[in-house]
Amino acid sequence: MGSLVGQFVLPPNNGYKIWEDPSFIKWRKRDAHVPMHCHESVEGSLRYWYERNKVNLLVSNEAVWDDDAVAKALDCAAYWVKDLPFVKSLSGSWKFFLASSPSHAPVEFYNSSFEDSSWASIPVPSNWQMHGFDRPIYTNVVYPFPFNPPKVPEDNPTGCYRTYFYLPKEWEGRRIFLHFEAVDSAFFAWVNGHPTGYRRPLASKYEKLISFTVSQDSRLPAEFEITEFCHPCGSDQKNCLAVQVMRWSDGSYLEDQDHWWLSGIHRDVHLLAKPKVEVKIDNSAMNLENTVETGSWFKMAEDKFIANFTIEAEIFDMGSWYAGVGHDNLLSTNVAHLQLTSSVDYHLGFIGYQLKGTLQTPKLWSAEQPNLYTLVITLKDASGHIVDCESCQVGIRQITKGPKQLLVNGQPVMVRGVNRHEHHPRLGKTNLEPCMVQDLVLMKQNNINAVRNSHYPQHQRWYELCDLFGMYMIDEANIETHGFHLSSNVKHPTGEPSWASSMLDRVIGMVERDKNHACIISWSLGNEASYGPNHAALAGYVRGKDSTRFVHYEGGGARTSSTDTVCPMYMRVWDIVKIAEDPAEPRPLILCEYSHAMGNSNGNIHEYWEAIDSTFGLQGGFIWEWVDQGLLKEGKDGNKHWAYGGDFGDTPNDLNFCLNGLIWPDRTPHPALHEVKFVYQPIKVSIEEGIIKITNTHFFDTTEALTFHWMMHGDGCELGSGILNPPTIEPQKSFSLKCDAGPWYDQWCKSDATEIFLTITATLSCSTRWAEAGHIVSSTQVLLPVKQEAISHIIEAKHAAFFTEVLDDAIEVKNGNLWEIRFNKQTGAIESWKVDGVLVMCKGIVPCFWRAPTDNDKGGEAQSYISKWKNAKLNNLTFTTESCTVLNVSDNLVKIAVVYLGMPNVSEKDLSQSDTFLFKVDLTYSIYGSGDVILECHVKPNSNLSPLPRVGIEFHLDKSMELVKWYGRGPFECYPDRKAAAHVGVYEQDVSSMHVPYIVPGECSGRADVRWVTFQNKDGLGIYASMYGGSPPMQMNASYYGTAELERATHNEELVKRENIEVHLDHKHMGVGGDDSWTPCVHEKYIVPAVPYSFSIRLYPVTAAASASFIYKSQLQKN
């Protein structure tokens, strides 16, 4: 040891720091291995897994996302070691001091006698930034410190931790191991003042030399033997554990992932007690020939202990544990016994031993059917006493390659995935079991069957839960060097031998820890770390170590020799189809990232899945990403809100680029998650030539566990519903039914509706681990042919007379106390519209072509939509009234024509540059005695304009008109390129609940394909609006937050409600996009070109007695 210490302890002035040496990554750290559980008996092992696997939907209800999570994290730490007699959790309240740098850490704070009473306390596990120390930093690409690899700043926040523990008497004679699940970034550890590895500089004093524990890789365990440093088991002398954690190290250069930079002991700390001779489940493999192999190979020259010890292994069927067996008779579920047999390892070239056995008719594991067994291995001495006992969950499944296919148990399963960071809005990177379960429950409920661990190995319990719930997984090494591409003059780690060992150690650590999990179908070499010889070495290791899984790596163009799948990110639909159709490419294409879910996004995703479902060689992908990475931060109002980059004073930062999730930080779903559930749904329904086809796209499940329902609506009104009883549909098979043979036929024939929609829904017949009975798995709406075609009915001037008065400054039209409309003669806009004496409309109607920019609108710098819109001054238009003319006045019809010119609102000195208008808009109001107002709108934009955000009208309603009812798509927010999941129907909400509180405000709350809408107060008074004549359905939006306010605010909590309701009825509205968020990527069919448009809208005053459906039908007539 002395020579090793001397090798690293150099003179104090030479500047050498171990945490800046990429070739020195660990010392005294044990080799990576699968998690150990240290059971005392087979029965104890089975009871442990029996209790551990009683996890379901109810557990997810215990998830907490606020301050209560701090205490919950300690509860989870205790729960995870429950019923493990030889594992002790050290998680709890530790003493803590934050130094400005390693050199400023308190001198010899690791000594047992050090006085720490003045130090603060901090919970472990945690990130210290989440407890008031230092600050979180969010960056996507750039490193948050001066880029000078492998050097890190002298200003390097350093956390000093201290805690105490006792060793139980029952552990006497056993080896003691100190186990850190994960620490960010690099750390030293001491027990009772004794270093257990690494080296720590002693401020400016170097009076003595010490050795120390060192470990890097902030997402994998570090384990050290500390037996010789501890007080005897059963002693009343307490042991002191001291840990020093540096925020930055050379390892930070390999961890430049797109997430928050947070530091500290963020996963659990354990003590393990193992016998001097121990058993370890080094590898378990079960193949489809029903052969089970497990254990390590032993060289003949080194197996003398076999004469004194016996190794036994058994497999137990977990599936029967909760079906009546109960915890008292777990041993009876034994289904296989494994024998120690000698074998030849032709790869290593020696004769050794393995445990082998046969399992008759095994139940295979897949995401659809996550069947698991429990493997228990015991080590007994010559007297037959159990010396050691280890166990793990085992899934029997096979991953193989086919032409352009990844096969699970011989089937080309479809990857319906998401990327998932470990993120808790209060805890940062610390995990809670209920929160992980809630993630899985939400994923399963929304038809997600795969997860990519972006971009590092995650908490070991996550893997157990994915095995249990059924989730395909890409397990990813903690390697990302994204920021290197900003500095081409610096040599990249992937080509440098000095970084090779560090990169390989991270891959080895991942594979060795996680290799026994059935859920993992592919290993990933990391993310956005370029490509070079080091990656080739990593791929070579993984393939040599584990040939039973795929290798994934996107770097270098996603098609290098180091990846078994073509795995691009954000590639366009047409380009992935080209690759799939390339006969020279034998690998399947699985998008490692696609459909960037930043704010109001995920447009076009249905087009990806139309291509994936119909193109051989396309096998799915992983949406970026699962959760908005917002952190809780107290605002000026004293309440806590979601914060993003820069909100903590962190520089550099990448603002809100951490908010890319399908769900909010507290796991509330974004509206886009409905669209994901729809395109991912396993039961597909289509109609063609009068035949309804129901397809089961599962690869293993039949439809036996599903109940099918049908419901039919005509013009938004329910016509009938019931149970549909198709025969059981086998995997990858279909059932067809003629429309006129369905149970809905009679109602369909009798209906005189102009639109008839049939909705077929598949629900769970029984409760599962992740959902209750009745949960909707799939739901599809199809349009049935109508028996009679309808044509638009033109309203005629033959209704009740009314009074019209043309004043100097206004035009008033009214019908007694029923309704009254007042136009401003100068502006041509409605100043007020009253119904039964109550103010309904307080401002309007004016043309509108602008929307509050979304995150996707902002992407692309000079080429972004917002840049082009602002360059054209679309955000600063003024509509001047060229004319306002009363065309016709009679007892039952008034026509008013208004011509608007849309011009940039520029200063007087810039008027010469604005000699042409951007829009000319002709509005014609036809006001009838019935109260009908038919608005005809003709828009002529300047032909030089770029595509427009919207083409429609805007008006303002009194704030009391808060009850919104519409016939269109819903009930949730939807847009022209994200509406497949939104069924057409009649829905009702209040204006406040329609608002979608994206953390960064922008265009939101729209509803697509609206036929009619009413806005009413609590007494039923209000206004009706609908498409009219040959105009198509509208895009509708109503909000207390105006467009300008949504554009102004940078956080949702900053929004200020206006005193009225801003309503938009759009003839055309541009899609939200979502292929990515840094280029203008709305697909062509959802673009709104600057060309002439004409459309008509019908407005009508309504009372409580009025029926919107009846009003709508009055403008339609049968052929």
Image (cartoon, rainbow, N blue to C red):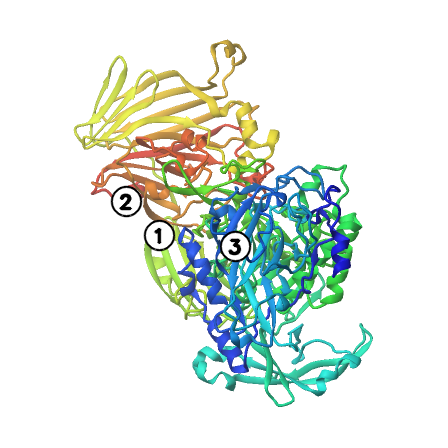
Label 2 packing within 10 angstroms: few (<14), some (14-19), many (20+) = few
| Front of the two marks 3 and 1 | 3
Q: Residue furthest right?
A: 349
Q: Are marks 1 and 2 in contact (CB under 8 Å)?
A: no
Q: CA distance from mark 1 to mark 2?
A: 13 Å
Q: Residue furthest bottom?
A: 383
Residue beneath disc 2? 1110
In the image, residue 740 sits, relative to residue 105, either above or below, namely: below
Earlier residue among tags 3 and 2: 3
Q: CA distance from mark 3 to mark 1?
A: 25 Å
Residue 840 at x, y = what percent? 26, 32
Q: Circle 2 — which element?
A: helix
Q: Circle 3 — which element?
A: helix
Residue 948 at x, y = what percent? 51, 30
| In the displayed structure image, the side of residue 845 where residue 1049 appears, left or right | right
Q: Circle 1 — which element?
A: strand
| In the displayed structure image, the side of residue 76 where residue 624 appears, left or right | right
Q: Nearer the viewer, residue 487 or 150?
A: 150
